Amino acid sequence: MIHYDPHKWLDHFFDIRGSLVREISGRVALCVVWSTLVVFVHKYVTNISMSSLLHTLVGFALGLLLVFRTNSSYDRYWEGRKLWGGIVNETRNLIRAAAIHLKNEPELLLQLTRWTALFPWATMSGLRGVSDLGPFEKELSPSDRLAIISAQHPAMAVTARMSECLNEARRRGAITDIIQMALDRNVELLVDYMGGCERIRKTPLPFAYVVHLRRALVLYCFTLPFALVDTFGWATILDVLVVSYVFFGIEEIGVEIEGPFGYDENDLPLEEICETIRKNLYAISGLGGTAQEALPEGL
């Protein structure tokens, strides 16, 4: 994610990074070259202009399609952020309560804190289809790391370890059955939030809608010079440049944010969220090492 000040226009007005200019530059350039050819043929060979009424009508419908596209993509983006906000809250709630009930079992509390802090990293890796556990690559023992990495669902394997810690606490008499159920409810909610993220990742927008929109965009932009050339002449090239940049840019924004869990510059800052959770949990538990780190701002 790119951090910026929305009140400052000029600071980022000419930025290329994150603006999707690179992604759409090929399509826009092709439209410009095609419009140049159309204007040349119209000026020096034969009249190939057409009425602009069709493009006026189609442009209205195309605008509605693009609005729906971007709204649907942003809904997915914002839902993903809310789900990760839930993960932040539930991990904090779990360790906050555990730090009180397990204050006489520091080793068990440390284990629970470590597995809970690992859960967001395992979830992020699962959403990205990789086997990266971040800082826990070194913090875990080789056997624990291998067990998590080789599990069919690493994040679920982590939640199983969290529940095992709570069960061990109950077996030792550190917590009652009721407290165990209350703490395990936080683990259940973490699984629910993770499932919501997986639903977003594995359910793209309907194929027919995306294909139809892109076909309509291509047809509109590549026939637009014929509708403008008789009125604007050589200025048609600039007109097509602006229109194609706007339309292809809007569509590409939808593509960029519909899957918010990846590595794109406009995706959610999952690494920052995971690291914030890790620091928060060790600080809340009040146990050694990273537990002494100050709580970070934000998130």
Image (cartoon, rainbow, N blue to C red):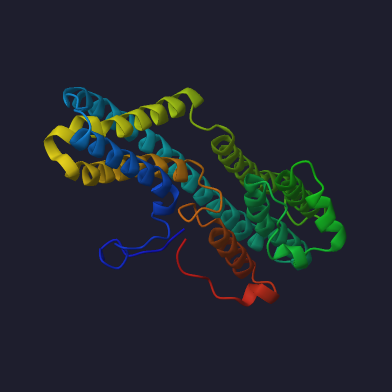
Q: Is residue 152 above or below residue 145?
A: above
Q: Nearer the viewer, residue 43 or 2?
A: 43
Q: Position of residue 213 (x, y in %)?
A: 39, 28
Does 5 appear above or below 74?
below
Counting every numbered tag in the picture gives 0
- The extreme left residue here reads 231
* Residue at the (34%, 43%) spot, across then down: 33
User: x%, y% of residue 261?
Assistant: 55, 48
Residue 279 or 236: which is nearer the viewer?
236
- What is the residue that sits farthest to the front in this orientation? 45
Tell me which residue sits at (68%, 52%) in the image.
122
Q: Residue furthest right?
A: 143
State the residue at coordinates (74%, 50%).
Answer: 158
Regarding residue 158, the answer to whether it shows in the image is yes
Residue 129, percent from left and from top: 67, 46
- Identify which residue, 296 or 182, lies in the foreground: 296
Q: Left or right of 235: which side holds 188?
A: right
User: Residue 70 location, x and y as percent?
Assistant: 37, 38
Position above or below: 225 against 239: above
- Location of residue 172 (image quadrant): bottom right
Q: Can I make out residue 105 in this image?
A: no
Residue drawn at 28 percent across, 39 percent down: 35
